[in-house]
Image (cartoon, coloured by chain):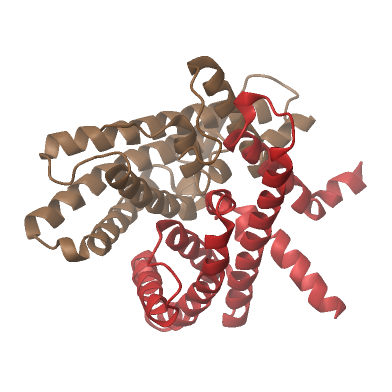
Amino acid sequence: MDKKISYSGVVVLSLCSVIPAATRLGYGIYLAVGVLWIFLFSVISRFFVKKMRIESISTLVESVMILASTILFEQLASFFMPIVVCTLSIYLYLEAFVSILMMAICTREYGVSRNGSFAEVFSEYFFVAFRFAIFILLFSFIRELAGFGTFSVPSSTGIYVIQLIPGVSASLFRYLASTGGGLLLAGVSICLSRVFTGKLASYEGDL
Amino acid sequence: MENFIQILLYGIIFSPVIVYGIGFEKSLSNSQNMKKFYLQIPQIILQVIFSILILWPICFFFLKHDRLYILYPIFLIFVVTLVNRLLYLILPWSKSSTYSNDIFSIGVVLIAIHSALSLQDALLIGFLSCCTLILMTFLLEFAKKRMIYSNIPVHMKGTPLFLVLMGILSLIFLGTGISWWIAGR
């Protein structure tokens, strides 16, 4: 890739799914694994389209294959964590749509080739997906710690919660675990990333 | 009239845009080019309304079996993409499918049909979600104009301040939802 999708670009793309959904690390783990699964099938669908020579309807075919893989992941995950899957059912499909958008942006704006070998395209896209998954995990962990003072993991009976900082959930910091609080944390995280990396995006658009 | 205002208020406050965060990234990107957004408004509303009108009978007459209902997202994307292509033919000033339009429409229609009890409820949810998106975009545009003349720290300019502003707006819009908490204390 000639350019890399910026941290603020990753955050903006996560607005429609991660910020409302990843209120606990347990949910974040499910979403992060889902993102990696969906991106893997995104690359496979791209190569399917290339091999079948149906580039004229590539977007539609890729979208359907990505959605089908999302349905498969949801059914498989429901064996291990049925309550988490039921809670986050809508958000996983929104993740699938975000992956379609991310692939289009990576292809059009960041020079990821449609014509490379499977290994080349896989490594380029997977780099983006891996960053996104790490962002989901860190963001959900910090949000849960700040909003509830707990640490959680998914289990077959829901979410297994461990209290780390007592008393936080009864305070005003609980707002940080809501959608509005997530947006606030996302904005602050972009500001901090600019401070530490020394990179400033243009005012008109960071994506 | 009073009922209409109440429905409008609660429909906007509890729309998928505020509750689920669908369309936040769209309102953020649209607020940076309002002329393009004005042209997209009819397309967005019509895309959501027509998609719901087409999908509702499909879901409730063909997909009502539990095992077939998992195919609903695939039908959803087919219908939304098809409606988008048809609208491009009918509305010549609208651009061809932009991914953010599709993502917003898909998210809103998914939730509208998933949570509504009747076709009228689904159409109302869809329409009010579009109204909420338009409202959020205008608010962010007004905020952007205020920011031009403000002395903002350089690292907070642009996206970070917009996200903090959206968080505060979300808190304001959900104020009625937490009124029980305030009353209880």
Residue B132, percent from left and from top: 66, 62
- The answer to whether residue B117 is seen in the rendering is no
Residue B118, percent from left and from top: 59, 80
Residue A156, percent from left and from top: 45, 40
Q: Nearer the viewer, residue B175 or B59?
A: B175
Name the quadrant containing residue A52.
bottom left
Colour assigned to chain A in the rendering is brown
In the figure, is residue B129 to the left or right of B70?
Answer: right
* Chain letter, red in picture: B
Residue B108, percent from left and from top: 53, 64
In the figure, is residue A50 to the left or right of B79?
Answer: left
Q: Is residue A150 above or below residue B78?
A: above
- The answer to whether residue A20 is seen in the rendering is yes
Q: Nearer the viewer, residue B157 or A47?
A: B157
In the figure, is residue A113 to the left or right of A25?
Answer: left
Q: Residue furthest front?
A: B149
Q: Is residue A50 above or below residue B82?
A: above
Task: Indicate the quadrant containing the C terminus of chain B: top left, top right, bottom left or bottom right.
Answer: top right
Residue drawn at 69 percent across, 41 percent down: B165
Residue drawn at 21 percent across, 32 percent down: A123
Q: Nearer the viewer, residue B154 or B65?
A: B154
